Image (cartoon, helix red, strand yellow):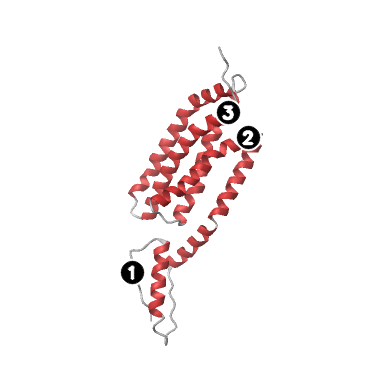
Amino acid sequence: MRLLVKTPITDANGIRELNNKLENIIAEYTKYSPYVASTALVNAGINSGVVENQVTTIFVAFVVIAILLIVVFRKILLALIAVVPIVVTTILNFSYMSILRMNLEVSTAITAGVLMGLIIDYSIHLISGYRRLSKKHDRAEASDLALRDIGPVIIASGLSLSAGFSSLFFAPLKLFLDLGILLVLGIVTGVVCTLVFVPQLLSLGSSKKKK
């Protein structure tokens, strides 16, 4: 005998709770040997694995990005400054999930990795401009000039990406809606963090030349 259960529940946590309730009901019929099978349960299992490996994945990604930046910039300090925006953005990403009561699932777990890949570009462009200008200017002046030169480009890029991902706001499935909200919030956060923290950190320990 096969029983088909239809449910509007689509999130992994909800599916697991429904599965537990079904198993409790089935357990009352001891003369049968039933089992619950569903594609949704398979997806829930995959989701559990992703969640459990989330911390390790993010840590490894940070290390790999930092190593690549050290190779590119050839300075550990510049590499550490470059990863500051993605560290702050990743932390705030999980804070947004908590505030908006979003579950950590496959769809929402990937946002951290996506945001890291998007936001690090802004730091690279800004620091590259700073390195070019620092050859002729004081640290603080080079930082200010790089911000004026590249800042508008970073803002335009962030706005265009946010506009593109905002199309997910109209998706019929909640998982796509959550993904869109987190990506837009993360991109805006990353842009702000890059424009605020990176220039300030680059200009530390420098005094502007008096004219």
Q: Are the two marked residues, 1 and 2, in contact with CB atoms closer than 8 angstroms? A: no
Where residue 116 appears, as percent x and y from the top left, is: 52, 44
Q: Is residue 47 above or below residue 183?
A: below
Which mark is in front, 1 or 3? Answer: 3
Check disc 1: other Cα within 10 Å, few if <14, some if 14-19, many if 20+.
Answer: few
Residue 48 image label: none
Disc 3 from disc 2: Cα separation:
12 Å
Where, quadrant-wise, is the C terminus in this rendering?
Answer: top right
Q: Residue furthest top?
A: 211
Where residue 76 appears, as percent x and y from the top left, is: 65, 36
Q: What secondary structure is found at the residue carrying circle 2?
A: helix
Residue placed under numbered mark 3 in the picture: 204
Residue placed under numbered mark 1 in the picture: 6
Where residue 128 appears, as percent x and y from the top left, is: 58, 30
| Label whose residue precedes the other's in the sequence (1 or 3) | 1
* Amino acid found under the numbered disc labelled 1: Lys
Q: What secondary structure is found at the residue carrying circle 3?
A: loop
Please name the residue shown 55% across and 53% down the image.
55
Q: What secondary structure is found at the residue carrying circle 1?
A: loop
Where residue 106 appears, as percent x and y from the top left, is: 47, 56
Residue 77 image label: 2
Disc 1 from disc 3: Cα separation:
60 Å
| Label whose residue precedes the other's in the sequence (1 or 2) | 1
